[in-house]
Amino acid sequence: MMKFLVTGFEPFGQSSINPSEQVVRHLAAMQFEEFGVATAVLPVHRTRGSEALITAVLQTQPDAIICLGEAGGRHAISIERVAINLMDYGLADNDGQLVQDAPIEPDGPAAYFTTLPVRKLMLAVQNGGIPAELSLTAGAYLCNQVTYELLHFLAKQQLDMPAGFVHLPFLPQQAAVRPGKFPSMALETMVTAVTTILTTLHTKLCGTITSARK
Ligand code: PCA
């Protein structure tokens, strides 16, 4: 049976809750008929974030990887297309480390495209009645960093498992304490959107495997 790794992040900044952690905890408690889902919650920490992600990949040996994170201010499920070789934190990590103008991997390429079928996933979420968009920047904080490190690791190891990142809007309770400034999305809606992403990816990958075996 195909296995996905889905990761979220712990809360950071002003928030005591992170929608990506909540979605991951929901998925961990769900049963899917056609595929398995392994989950991990990553620390918002300059070095430990990507270490935890790579460890989870090695431990779970997934067929595909979807990382999730919070992006307060976005109004839709935001599927990232690219990760850049830059740390330029607008906010210290949860350990108080603020890194600016520094490469993630001094000898690494400037950027990696994610390897998910991003447009297909966006359309599937939209067809399910949930706002979704493609994004050209995951920022220059931890979400971008773990995505870059993951894609760099997979490239170096010559592992061709599809991997990418999806940013989530604030939850309603996060927007409620920042009145009038931020869009939000209900947890249930985000769980449905991520489930749609997994189902769509499963169908695509099964098709690929089946036709490759023919
Ligand atoms: N969002 C941050 C880091 C952790 C998270 O959930 C980001 O967009 O980089």
Image (tube, helix red, strand yellow):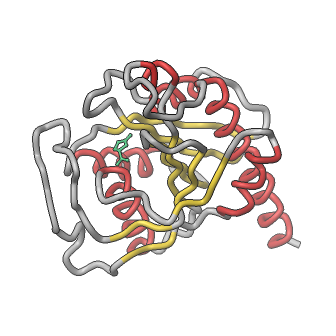
Q: Position of residue 204 (x, y in %)?
A: 78, 59
Of residue 122 and residue 73, the one placed in the foreground of this image is: 73
Side of 52 relative to 80 (left or right):
left
Question: Where the C terminus falls, by quadrant?
Answer: bottom right
**In this view, 105 is above or below 18:** below
Side of 103 relative to 159 (left or right):
left
What residue is at 53 percent from the left and 65 percent from the top?
Answer: 81
Side of 154 relative to 95 (left or right):
right
Marks counted in the figure total 0
What residue is at 68 percent from the left and 38 percent from the top?
Answer: 193
**In this view, 88 is above or below 69:** below
- Looking at this rendering, what residue extends furthest in the right direction? 214
Q: Position of residue 69 (x, y in %)?
A: 44, 42
**In this view, 196 is above or below 147:** above
Q: Position of residue 88 (x, y in %)?
A: 22, 60
Side of 13 relative to 171 (left or right):
left
Q: Position of residue 180 (x, y in %)?
A: 46, 28
Quadrant of the rendered image containing residue 104: bottom left
| Rendered-image quarter of ligand 1 | top left
Question: Where the N terminus falls, by quadrant?
Answer: top right
Quadrant of the rendered image containing residue 85: bottom left
What residue is at 57 percent from the left and 63 percent from the top?
Answer: 161
What residue is at 67 percent from the left and 64 percent from the top?
Answer: 117
- Looking at this rendering, what residue extends furthest in the front direction? 180
